[in-house]
Amino acid sequence: MYQKVLLAADGSDHARRASGHAVKLLKNVPDGHLDVIYIIDKDQSKSDVLHYGNKEIIQMKRREQLEDLENDLKEAGISYEVHIEHGEPGPTIVSFANDGAYDCLVIGSRGLNQLQTMVLGSVSHKVVKRVHCPVLVVK
Amino acid sequence: MNFSQLKMEWLGNIKGDVLAGIVVALALIPEAIAFSIIAGVDPQVGLYASFSMAVMISIVGGRPGMISAATGAMALVMVTLVADHGLQYLLATTVLTGIIQLLIGFSGLARWMKFIPRSVMVGFVNALAILIFLAQIEHFRGNSFWPFVLAGMALAIIYLFPKLTGAVPSTLVAIIVVSMVTVFGGINASTVGDMGTLPRSFPVFLLPDIPLTLETLMIILPYALSLSVVGLLESLLTATIVDDMTDSESNKNQEARGQGISNVVTGFFGGMASCAMIGQSVINVKSGGRGRLSAFVAGVFLLFLILVLQGFVVQIPMAALAGVMIMVSISTFDWGSLPMLAKAPKTDSIVMVVVVATVVYTHNLAIGVVAGVILSAVFFAAKISKVHVSTTIKDEMTRVYYVDGPLFFASVTDFVKSFDYKENFDRVEIDLSRTHLWDDSAVEAIEKVRLKFKQEGTKVRFTGINEESSELMRKLEGMSSGH
């Protein structure tokens, strides 16, 4: 049974679909807990600072990205916590997952940026190779 | 600042800082040379500046982990100064820029920064990107196709090499490979050596060789003011980005003063005015740099490399540097602002475009920023200048007007026109509880309305005026009756 699950989210519809599957894993699990990790990479840092300037607004806007996803989780009655981390998405998710001793990592197969996926390969692919726990890649 | 915090900022991350500093030094070489060439000075001016700036700011800056050196934004402002008056005037301007920044730092920078809207900042970086790109076109003039091939090769390496490894800056790899192709292929291309001298020794402390007259001051002051604004804007933007990337806080006023001190020193060491660099700071943080030591190592190692690799650096083809600059331009441009143009409020989009257009036309980022701030203020005044006056009848003798919206110079014309002065009522009541009187024009307008009604034999009573507004009225009336 999966008790401690990590969900990698980025505010996209793919991530929200992935969260649906995380909910399925944790539904009816006593003491089940979901950690949601949202990675801010350097480009996002730059563009957020440029467009919103001030720290409070930036934090609010980022949290807003996850609003729909959080509402889904609240509705399903899942105990969860959101972690906003800085760095490159792939390696940051990997180290967070490996440090936390999770039973399962749930991740969407694609993120927000199609072009990036084409040029750099998908984040989920790199993560699957290096994470120690089982990974559920949601199509 | 206490000792333990200082020790933490210098020695808290030695391994990460040293490694990141070395990476940044490598990545700085092409940029420092290329920005010197944009400014129209010898590569040594940008290299000395980058050394002095990085080392000084590591000591006196407010944002550990941030890298300052010769930048495109500053280089672009000084082009005409260098062309018209030469290097010595540039060095004097650099010192004066530092003094102005120091003063701004002491006066509390945050107070000034709040007047700069986000759309102006976006316009600033986009204009910067466009100017850096345009400055590269001259390297592709002429009949030879080689510059296109070499720059294309450089760009391909810059974007594809990180797929193999992220340990070495891809810009440096591009420079090395393209230089070797040029040298061993016997390709005839203009090189860094053709552009002027490189440093042969540590920089020496010298006073700029200029006449100390009022005329000199009048030449350098406008440039120093522009450079101060541009340098602080980019430095603070960079500091905030580093704050965000490292999830920590920094002292912006200390950073402004630090930029000032560093520019003063840099001018005396024969360097051009400089500021923080977004791209290099991001490279530093990504490579594990967090503390002051990273900028210090970057500066010292940069100078060491240049002194040792002298013979190699002069052979770098300009087309390879142009490739690096095109990458800098692409990563500086805020691509997210393009789809935003359609979605954002129209006035914000207009401000952004006006900033870009002004900068591309004047080649001065500071003028673009000032134009953007003024235009934003005008749009804001226009937006809030709408007053709405509604009316009801209280009894047979009295009509009541309700005023909504602020009263100030831009709204009083509409306000005065909103009343029907040829009333059949004996009395008029004007309810001011939902308005605010902001300036002398507002007080004057109230007086005008009262007089106009009086001419028609209607008595006017103002009600619900808030305290601040009535105080303003008292003050201004006191002033006019005092004469």
Image (cartoon, rainbow, N blue to C red):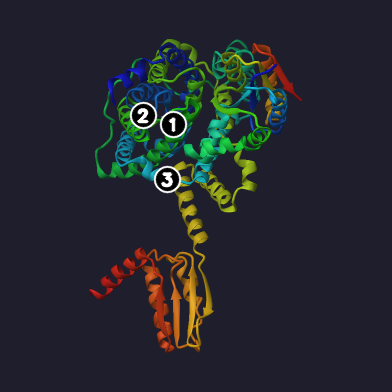
What is the spatial separation of the Cα atoms under label 3 and label 1, in whole angstroms? Answer: 16 Å
Question: Which residue is labeled 2 in the image?
Answer: B62
Q: Earlier in the sequence, mark 3 or mark 1?
A: 3
Q: Chain of mark 3?
A: B
Residue at 57 percent of width and 31 percent of height: A44
Q: How many residues crowd around disc 3 within 10 Å: few (fewer than 14), some, or many (20 or more)?
A: few
Question: In which quadrant will I find the C terminus of chain B?
Answer: bottom left
Name the foreground residue: B477 vs B441.
Answer: B477
Residue B285 percent location from the top left of the image: 48, 22
For label 1, the residue is B239
Residue B29 location, x and y as percent? 47, 19
Asked if residue B203 is positioned above or below residue B80 in the image, the reply reads above
Asked whether residue B169 is in view, the answer is yes
Q: Along the line of sight, which residue is nearer the eye, B91 or B18?
A: B18
Crowdedness near tag 2: few (<14), some (14–19) or many (≥20) residues, C-alpha within 10 Å: many
User: Which of B418 and B101 lies nearest the eye of the viewer?
Assistant: B418
Amino acid at dot 3: Lys
Disc with the residue nearer the chain's start (1 vs 2): 2
Give me the C-alpha separation between circle 1 and circle 2. Answer: 9 Å
Asked whether the residues under the numbered discs 3 and 1 touch, taking CB atoms below 8 Å apart as contact, a structural biologist would say no
Quarter of the figure that contains the N terminus of chain B = top left
Q: CA distance from mark 2 to mark 3?
A: 19 Å
